[in-house]
Image: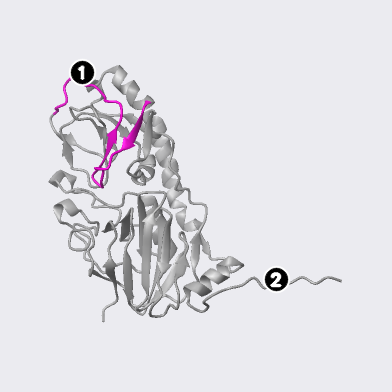
Amino acid sequence: MAPALRMLEPGLSTTVQDLGRSGYQHLGVAVSGALDPVSLRAANALVGNTPGLGALEVAYVGPTFVVEADSVRLACVGSSARIEILPGEGAAETVKIAGMQTFRARRGQVIRIGALSDAAVLYVAVEGGFAIEPVLGSVSTYARGGMGGWQGRTLRPGDTLPLIQDRARERGEFRLEGLNLSRPKRYRAILGPQHAFFSEGAIKRLFESEYVVKAASNRMALLLDGPALEHVAGFDIVSDGIAMGSIQVPGHGQPIVLMADRQTTGGYPKVATVISADLPALGRARIGETIAFEAIGIEEAQELRRRHLLEIGSIPDRVVPLTRSGDDIATHLFGSNLISGAIDAHCSYAD
């Protein structure tokens, strides 16, 4: 039997994503890729994969899946969530798993990831990765185009995702330290290519106001609800290229921030563009969350990008052996199903 993960429940929206399908926008092919590439890179670093290897992107509610391999090593990075190995074959009782660290599971064990609590997405990396054929150089799922990932769509019950490795390598477990996944109070942005289509008052309003992420938001775009931005030169332009983070404004005046599955061209004026250094945090933004923007200049944006690249380049250096002391020992033994409980046996003696 080929090694695989079999979906029992796929969660709200679980897809295979990597760093995206670059180089084909001129042909009308969306880039796609992880909404939060920092968490994707971190999850891969933990299990020893290359930074951009395909992993599961989980949105809002996680999947439940069974291991159909001798053993697997996994890591979950992104939002906090309840991660468990359920009672059943190889597990006498529920085993709770911490995020930001690796863990192993054996054939027949069932892993359940619950509701995400503090961000929109979570990434599940598997040591060795998935045995999925790339499309145009990427395994990222573009569901609108039926391209990439697993059969070009979000996962369904019964889907069996093939794995490269049949068993996890014999090594210790690791954790990730010092990774900041917080979201800023204001996302920094530079003025967009059509900012002259808006009044000075509208631009000022954009950078002084707060907006709520609407329920209709998805991987293609964050639809925002807040003060409308009026146009002074119409709201139709000759379609031109779209970058991730572009803030376009249709005739109704409500901003729309284009994300990973954005269209390749658009015909609405773009008032601003969120800087690349803040895009991973924006990808974590949840429906119903209040967000705001801050205007900066291009030179500052470039410097922030340089710092951001240094930060993500340091992720492998943040991977350290899982400490075998106190609670960490119990966590390891639970994860290996070597114990079913633990007590504090500390005693004191009086004279």
| Between 4 and 240, the one nearer to me in the picture | 4
**In the rendered picture of this protein, how many numbered marks are placed on residues?**
2
**Span colored in magenta:** 209-237
Q: Quadrant of residue 296?
A: top left
Residue that numbered label 2 is attached to: 346
Residue 116 vertical position relative to residue 235 in the rendered view, above or below = below
Q: Quadrant of residue 140?
A: bottom left
Say whether residue 346 is left or right of residue 237. Answer: right
Residue that numbered label 1 is attached to: 232
What predominant SS class does the magenta segment belong to?
Answer: loop
Question: Viewer-nearest of labels 1 and 2?
Answer: 2
Q: Mark 1: give few (<14), some (14-19) or many (20+) Cα within 10 Å.
A: few
**Which residue shows up at 16% across the image and 48% down it?**
29
First reached walking from the N terminus: tag 1 or tag 2: 1
Say whether residue 214 is left or right of residue 174. Answer: left
Q: Quadrant of residue 149?
A: bottom left
Quadrant the N terminus occupies: bottom left
